[in-house]
Amino acid sequence: MANIIVLLSLLGVAVGNILTHKYPVECAPPFNKTDDATTTVGYVTLSPLERCCTCTHECKELGGFCALRWAMDIYPHCCDFTPAIPCKDYSCTCCIKCADDKCSPCVETGGECRKECRVREQEDTVNKCEYHNGGEDGCKCCKNCEATDECTGAEGICRPNADDCPFGTYASTGCCGGCYCCKPALQVIPDTNCALKDSYCSETPECENGYYSCFGECSKTIYNSGLSKTVFGYCCIRK
């Protein structure tokens, strides 16, 4: 399908009218009359259409551009979103194409903006796309988190953001696609004696002088083939 997305231009002239909804000849829908008096959509010539809609500040701030409304009606899949943001007049509509995002926090951290993430991709809910609409109905930041031998060897798992690492792990290197490897690390289990006193976690029962060991009050999370397992360790508590 030919790309019908109308290019932005500052040379646009006023088109359409909110009362009559009529278009100048050079910006009118390409309908052709048939023998039975019906209409069919003809081939859309992009050349004159790029002069028909001038982008407004409000639309541009969202990372979109103003396109002819009838063109978007004919080819609705050309826009991922059409927010209710004013363009120059009624004949144009604000068009958001997620893939056009080139400089948002998402892209800068290795992600790609899409309407929906692909299979095996993970959504980064921290580093947003330019048009994210609060995360409810907007472009999603999608990352293809692929583990290297460093991450799998450490029994870790890839996550798109450091804040996504589960309990019993810490964010480290070892993943591609702008992602983090969450590697196992003993952490104090909340609401235990270990959490309430001057203490630290240990892989072994040997503690520093002045501390005694208590098993089961620290834990870490390991991953094998995507399956998680909780492993308990020792807490060294001050006497």
Image (cartoon, grey):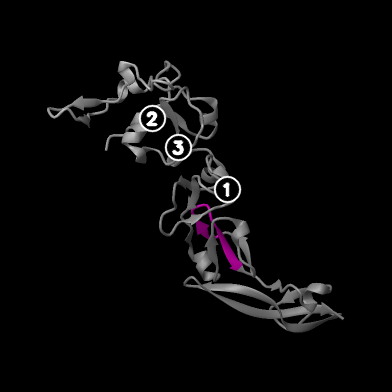
Label 3: how many Cα within 10 Å (few below 14, some 14–19, many 20+):
some
With 114 as the anchor, is 166 left or right in this view?
right
Q: Is residue 79 visible?
A: yes
What element does badge 1 sit on?
A: loop
Residue 69 vs 140, above or below: the answer is: above
Q: Which residue, given by chain and number where applicable, does mark 1 sit on? A: 127
Q: Amino acid at mark 3?
A: Thr
User: Could you tell me how far apart the alpha carbons at marks 3 and 1 are, in whole angstroms?
Assistant: 22 Å
User: Could you tell me how far apart the alpha carbons at marks 3 and 2 are, in whole angstroms?
Assistant: 10 Å
Q: Is residue 208 visible?
A: no
Residue 54: percent from left, percent from top: 45, 22
Q: Indicate which disc, 1 or 2, sits on the residue closer to the N terminus.
A: 2
What element does badge 3 sit on?
A: loop
Magenta residues, as a range? 174-183
Q: Amino acid at mark 1?
A: Asn
What element does badge 2 sit on?
A: helix
The quadrant of the rendering that contains the C terminus is bottom right
Q: Which residue, given by chain and number where applicable, does mark 2 sit on? A: 69
Residue 82 vs 184, above or below: the answer is: above
